[in-house]
Image (spheres, coloured by chain):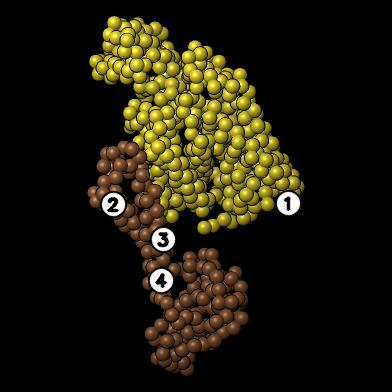
Amino acid sequence: MNYTLPNKLKLFAIILMVLGAVGIGAGFLSAPGSTAEVKQMMAAHGDDHGEASNESHDTIKDSHGDAAHGASHDAADEQKHLEHTLHQLQNRPWSALYVACFFFFMIALGALAFYAVNFAAQAGWSPVLFRVMEAVTAYLVPGGIIMFVLLGLSGFHINHLFVWADPEVVAHDKLLQGKASWLNGTWMLIRAAIFLGGWITYRHFAVKFSRAGDTAKENDYSNFKKTFRISAGFLVFFLYTESMMSWDWIMSFDPHWFSTLFGWYVLAGMMVCAITTIALITIFLKSQGYLEIVNDSHIHDLAKFMFGFSIFWTYLWFSQFMLIWYANIPEEVTYFMTRIEDFNLPFFGMLAMNFLFPLLLLMNSDYKRVNWFVVLTGIVILVGHYIDIFVMVMPGTVGKSWFIGIPEIGSMLFFLGLFILVVFTALTKAPLVLKNNPFMKESKNYHY
Amino acid sequence: MTGQDKLLNLKTTSMASKVIHAIYNDDDILMHAVKQTRAAHYHIEEVYTPFPVHGLDKVMGLEPTRIAITAFMYGIVGLAVAITMMNFIMIEDWPQDIGGKPSFTYIENMPAFVPIMFEMTVFFAAHLMVITFYMRSKLWPFKKAENPDVRTTDDHFLMAVDTAHHDIDKMSKFLQDTGAVEISIVESDDDH
């Protein structure tokens, strides 16, 4: 059966995009253009904010340790601080855009990896869900292009998202000079092109073979075999490139800091979000009367993966946190210091949303079969991981000047709308159940 | 129904309850047999299989296991034990300076205790769950196996059906038709 895109859904997605675009535009327009405007904004916000910022400026001064300059430089320091805040506030709409863009792109990428895993493992339960997964991965192309443009703008210092892209900063920074052979605009963009190119190529052929299977002769499994082979190859490519992607696109916001399991951490978050999205879309389609062959056991399995990857994500989060906390080495511990001090609520809040919530709600086997339960948990997981990306990106770009306001919500709405539009349009392109997959019968009869 | 049949029925019910042992040699046939037997409203006492047959419990209409709930509670007990234990050992009895951060409070040193909290949760849940399972199944060391036919430990499946007030001949015929390779009628033990 073919899916037809309901006009209401299309309209809803377009409204989200328009609202989002307005929000993004408002964010860019309201960003201050000069230090004078920053001063005005700070005055408007009241003394509270000003004092808090002054404290930070004091610590910055202390860390510079220029005692000889003394109090006479207060005015210059004040100016310096205003400039610093100006840059942070100018970064804010860009960062908001980046977080939203990466989050939805990562869902498509995670779904692609999950799709490949199912092929490589010759999974018997999942073929009834393959068309949903293919549709989710359709966002890889537009999402990847926007991501690439954003990376280009940041890598070549059109905006100030990446500190390492600022030649002035690098000139005064020994550590960044040492990393410059890897962290420079050109090479990062070449890498991004290789990553995106590889992923999109795999997606292109996997979908092509899947569609070819629909028109092939009965019991002709040659297309399945082809996808099986390229999936195995893709997974090797993906695990290396995903890791490097997470250094380039996320970890380099804090270019002095590094974590060796960062790639895994991003991967775990990516997989939870992707599987949750697949589950949500499947349940939505079922509620519309499509995908009748998907039964509670398929939803149960998706919910098991949501539960499992949530625990895996927490395991990695804790592994990263505990070692750094225990060793207490200054250059490592700053990463968590800024997050705990300046991002306390989102940092610990997302830990509760991404760990405690799925742990308690999805632990019971029966609950994993209750669709509305899976939807509820799924929404909390998605919001939680959105905040996770937010907390990974914002401290390095916006710092203390973060806020969840119009630019953040606008960016989220825009990319959500685009994601819904692309994914549900892709769903209409082929029958919802594929043919000529040797595991189709097993998948249709699958029960727990 | 003739008078003689009624008499026969009376006779069977008045006797100590008898059990029919129907033996199968394939798990798929067994599953179908269980479905048919239940559909015919015969009471299945027990099914003996050489390996766990997937879905058999549902077909037999057994209540879902509650061991998961006990596991959850045991896990919470383990977590509580770990917290109490680490608090006593590392904070109260002999305060430790953990990672060069001398705070001497449980909450601020908690990251160091998380692995222990996790391990104890798993340890308690796993071990107490196994012990609960043994107790509920009335299994203990040197316990004599309650196995009606040793072949069910090899390659045969046995369905024990309560004759109750049913016609034994009719039942035997019925079970034969479900694909049983062997039928035997046994007096059931009262203490079973």
Q: Residue at x 56, y 39 (%)?
A: A111
Quarter of the image where one finds residue A30: top left
Chain under label 4?
Answer: B
The tag on residue B89 is 2
Q: Nearer the viewer, mark 1 or mark 3?
A: 3
C-alpha distance separating marks 4 and 1: 49 Å
Identify the amino acid type marked 1: Asn
Residue beneath disc 1: A219
Residue beneath disc 4: B134
C-alpha distance separating marks 1 and 2: 66 Å
The numbered mark, 3 or 2, whose residue comes first in the sequence reads 2
Q: Nearer the viewer, mark 4 or mark 2?
A: 2
C-alpha distance separating marks 1 and 3: 46 Å
Secondary element at image label 1: loop
Q: Report if residue A415 is visible in the image.
A: no
Residue beneath disc 3: B126
Secondary element at image label 2: helix
> Is the residue marked by circle 4 packed among few (<14), some (14-19), or many (20+) residues within 10 Å?
few
Horizontal and vertical percent position of residue A380:
40, 39
C-alpha distance separating marks 3 and 2: 24 Å
Chain under label 2?
Answer: B
Query: What is chain A's hue in the picture?
Result: yellow
Chain under label 3?
Answer: B
Specify the chain shown as brown.
B
Q: Report if residue A316 is visible in the image.
A: yes
Quarter of the image where one finds residue A327: top left
Identify the amino acid type marked 2: Ile
Instruction: From this view, report whether residue A97 is shown above or below residue A69.
Output: below
